[in-house]
Amino acid sequence: MIKTIRYFHFLAIFAIIFVSAGCVTRTITVKTNPDNALVYIDDKLAGESPVTIPFTYYGTRKIMIEKRDEDGRLTHERATVFEKIKAPVYEVFPLDFFSEVLWPGKLKDDHVLNYDLVKLEPLSRKEQQEKVIKNAEELRQRVYAPDF
C-alpha cells in the first residue's frame, strides 16, 4: 500500500514537471528608420517595419529591406544584409535539453535589429541612360570573359 502511494506521488510529481515544462520563444524584430519599409527575411516577405517574426533555428539570415512610394518606385536605397543570429548559452548542447524540456518556466529570446535607410537622390534622364549603358557594358564583359 505504501509503495503504491509513493509510486503515485512520484508519477504525480513527474507529470507536473512535464506539464509545466518550459519552452523557448525565439523572435526576430526588425526596425527601420524610416518606418513602413518592406522587410524580407530569407527571401520571404515578413511585413512592414517594425516587424516581429518567430523562428526555430539559429544561424545566418538574409534580410532585405526596401522602401517604395505609392507608385512602386524605390525612395530609399535597398539594403541586403546577412545577420548571424547566435544562440544564447542556454541553447547550446547539452544545456538546451534543460531549457527546452525541464525548465519550469518560459524563456524568451528576442533579437532586435535596427537599420537606417539611405534616401535615394533622383537621377536625371541622362544619368539614368548612362547608368544603364554602364551596367550593360559590365554584363557584356562578364559574358565574354574566359572562365578560369
Image: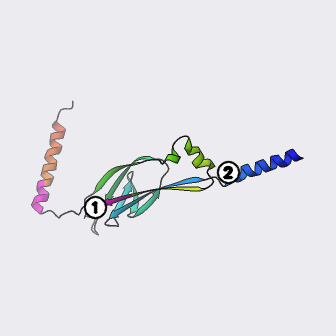
Residue drawn at x 37%, y 56% as measured from the top left: 40
Which residue is nearer to you in this view: 145 or 103?
103
User: How far apart are the alpha carbons under marks 1 and 2?
Assistant: 46 Å
Q: Is 85 left or right of 132, judged from the image as shown?
A: right
Which image quadrant for residue 139?
Answer: top left
Query: Magenta stretch containing residue 139, yes or no?
Result: no
Q: Point out the residue furthest to the top here.
A: 148
Q: Residue furthest left?
A: 126
Q: How far across and how far down the image is residue 115, in percent?
A: 32, 59
Inspect the image, locate mark 1, and give the three-letter code of the amino acid beneath it.
Leu
First in residue order: circle 1 vs circle 2:
2
Q: Residues within 10 Å of mark 1 (few under 14, many from 20)?
A: some
Secondary structure beneath dot 2 equals: helix
> Which region of the structure is painted magenta?
113-130
Identify the mark at residue 18; answer none if there is no mark.
Answer: 2
Sort mark 2 into few (<14), some (14-19) or many (20+) by Cα contacts within 10 Å. few
Residue located beneath label 1 in the image: 117
- Specify the amino acid type for callout 2: Phe
